[in-house]
Image: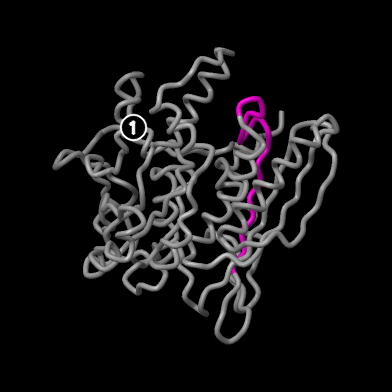
Amino acid sequence: MADSVASLGGEFGFINLIRSRITDPAGIRGIGDDCAVLPMNSTTDLVVTTDLLIEDVHFILSDITAAQLAYKSAAVNLSDIAAMGARPIGCFLSIALPKNVTAKWADQFIESFIAICDRFGATLLGGDTTSSKGPIAINVAVLGKVPCGRSKLRSSARPGDLICCTGTLGDSGAGLDVVLSRVASAENAKLDADAEWLVRRHYEPTPRIQEGLLLGELEGVHAMMDISDGIASDLNHILKASSTGSVQLGADVHVEQLPLSSKLRRWSAANGKNAIELALTAGEDFELLMTISPNDLDRARGCLASLCPLTVIGEITASHKGIRYMDGDQELTQQFAGYTHF
């Protein structure tokens, strides 16, 4: 039997295979960040992202409303724009629907999709529609703009930087657990308030557009990306992109400092779940993960004071490679791995 795609090293091994066969055109940054960066004119760069959502891989149609699916389809792409410190300017939607999808469902999807895109300034500019003999497939592309040369990249972390994130972590992963349990039981039992909130966090993540714009203006904010696959995976992307032949970066993550919502803590305790593991590995929180010069931490926090908390969860180091997980002064022996598709 031929080797599977997983034999390439998983999802990111496949991406690296693609990257190895491509040379970016002069002046363009292609694969490797949350968005590609293309020069628009002498003062502005264009950033472009695209994401694909497939039924039964990214969502369970029986559990999610058309409006929620539309919201999430747009939000996960808008989050990539935020991670670059950019402002959304437009989007494209391509969708494949089975012929038995109702007109009402389609209308609710489009109404919700346009509403969230308009809310963040990403006007729907076009796309494609087709029928599907299998699952629903949704592809969204979003365009944004940023001052020339000011995009926040994964490759800019420096030794001594503080590792920070917006909002709280692990909520979406817990929400997914609630969804999967509900689908498996085939029951429509009413959820308690904490579980309902966690499910909303999974289906309706908040794109940190304004936060990204404010952080994008600060020189002391170095590397930045959004959290789609969990800290354990996404922080490794920053370390790999920022390392050079002579300087290999590592990170210390202090698990006691991870920002956990009270709702996640209560739900985890009641259901025998590990909130810290969810925060590190579950992904789809779509918060911003960044490295910041210690001298600029207070300024960054001040910029976001009216929007969301900014929490220090660790620091970048050149003393070791990879991520070391700490609980106080104690190094954890447990290793954590984020989500991968293959």
Residue behind mark 1: 263
Image coords of residue 5 (percent x, y): 65, 39
Residue in front for this viewpoint, 342 or 190: 190
Write the residue at 70% across / 48% down: 139
Residue in front for this viewpoint, 289 or 182: 182
Image coords of residue 6 (percent x, y): 60, 37
Which kind of residue does numbered mark 1 sit on? Lys
Q: Quadrant of residue 50?
A: bottom right
Residue 60 against residue 128 in the figure, above or below? above
Residue 52 on the magenta segment: yes
Residue 267 on the magenta segment: no
Q: Alpha-carbon neighbours of circle 1 within 10 Å: few (<14), some, or many (≥20)?
A: some
Q: Is residue 44 left or right of residue 163?
A: right
Q: Quadrant of residue 26?
A: bottom right
Write the residue at 59% across / 63% down: 121
Write the residue at 37% across / 58% down: 290
Image coords of residue 215 (percent x, y): 38, 66
Residue 179 against residue 313 in the figure, above or below? above
Image coords of residue 45 (percent x, y): 57, 76
Magenta range is: 47-63
Q: Check the picture and name the quadrant holding the N terminus.
A: top right
Q: Check the picture and name the quadrant holding the C terminus.
A: top right
Write the residue at 45% across / 43% down: 285
Counting every numbered tag in the picture gives: 1
Q: Is residue 220 left or right of residue 34?
A: left
Looking at the rendered structure, the secondary structure element under dot 1 is: helix
Q: Which residue is most to the bottom?
A: 42
The image's colouring method is: one colour
Residue 160 against residue 41 in the figure, above or below? above
